[in-house]
């Protein structure tokens, strides 16, 4: 089975600062997708950003960017200018062959 | 568009009972999937479908059945509920093309407790 690792169970960041959430994956496939989702305390899953394995540039979506290092098999999420509303669980996911595998998540707390 | 809808929001079952969790989407997505989320374990794929009439197993399929008779609906059946199936269940859907699955959109979840 594919493996997704998020090594930071909990992170704290000062409001307006940037924060990086780590994600590594283990795959032998050449074609795959990497996703980040946010889960606030209300429980819904919110899509943030996507990176394809063949994409040469790092994905960006507003304040979110994905630091994709293919050789290292890492797909870290960078949140710039953190806001109080960014406090939530963040999940990294890997897709290959129509199957998705999620990491165990990182709990981010933004401090005023 | 309603997006992805799930019913019920909450359910309590007794061990051995069966039930069906409903999932529907109105975005004409080919791909639909079911996950369970347990504390500290992230989301795990139960079953998925790449189109009407086509289903396949995910990472943790035991104890669950699915069918996909229409593009819109993808129900999940618990055959004989066990306490180990206490979890939050999410349904998701996305476009699927060239053998790849695009960004998934999730339903609000069903919180299931099996006593």
Image (spheres, coloured by chain):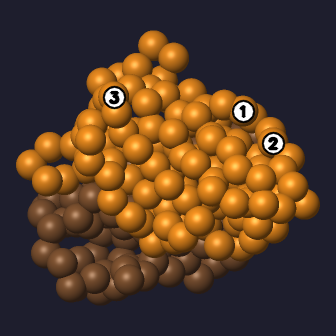
Chain colours: A brown, B orange
For the point 58% across and 34% down, which residue is it?
A: B22
Q: Quadrant of residue B94?
A: top left
Q: Quadrant of residue A1?
A: bottom left
Residue B70 numbered mark, or none: 3
Furthest-left residue in view?
A: B98
For the point 32% across and 52% down, which residue is it?
A: B55
SS of the residue under disc 1 = loop
Relative image position of residue B81 (x, y in whole percent): 73, 60
For the point 80% across and 39% down, which residue is it?
A: B10
Residue B11 numbered mark, or none: 2
Q: Is residue A66 visible?
A: no
Relative image position of residue A99 (x, y in whole percent): 34, 63
Neighbour tally class for label 1: few under 14, some 14-19, many 20 plus, Cα within 10 Å = some
Badge 2 sits on which subunit? B
Furthest-top residue in view?
A: B1
On screen, residue B113 above or below B103: below
SS of the residue under disc 2 = strand
On screen, residue A34 above or below B103: below
Neighbour tally class for label 3: few under 14, some 14-19, many 20 plus, Cα within 10 Å = few
In the rendered image, which residue does mark 1 sit on? B8
Disc 2 from disc 1: Cα separation: 7 Å
Badge 3 sits on which subunit? B
Q: Are marks 2 and 1 in contact (CB under 8 Å)?
A: yes
- The answer to whether dots 3 and 2 both sit on one chain is yes
Disc 3 from disc 2: Cα separation: 25 Å
Instruction: Indicate which disc, 3 or 1, sits on the residue closer to the N terminus.
Output: 1
In terms of depth relative to the viewer, which is nearer, B108 or B52? B52
Q: Is residue B11 visible?
A: yes
């Amino acid at each position: 089975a594919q493996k997704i690792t998020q090594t930071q169970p909990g992170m704290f960041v000062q409001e307006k600062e940037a924060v990086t959430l780590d994600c590594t994956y283990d795959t032998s496939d050449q074609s795959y997708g990497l996703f980040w989702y946010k889960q606030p305390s209300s429980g819904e899953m919110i899509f943030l950003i996507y990176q394809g394995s063949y994409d040469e540039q790092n994905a960006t979506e507003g304040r979110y960017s994905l630091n994709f290092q293919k050789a290292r098999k890492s797909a870290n999420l960078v949140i710039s200018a953190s806001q109080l509303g960014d406090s939530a669980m963040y999940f990294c996911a890997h897709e290959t062959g129509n199957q998705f595998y999620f990491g165990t998540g990182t709990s981010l707390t933004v401090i005023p | 568009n309603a997006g992805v809808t799930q019913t019920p929001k909450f359910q309590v079952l007794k061990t051995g009972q069966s039930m069906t969790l409903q999932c529907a989407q109105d975005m004409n997505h080919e791909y639909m999937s079911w996950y369970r989320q347990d504390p500290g374990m992230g989301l795990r794929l139960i079953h998925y479908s790449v189109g009407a009439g086509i289903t396949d197993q995910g990472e943790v399929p035991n104890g669950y059945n699915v069918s996909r008779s229409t593009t819109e609906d993808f129900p999940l059946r618990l055959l004989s509920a066990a306490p180990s199936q206490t979890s939050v269940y999410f349904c998701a859907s996305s476009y699927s093309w060239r053998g790849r699955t695009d960004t998934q959109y999730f339903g609000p979840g069903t919180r299931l407790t099996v006593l």
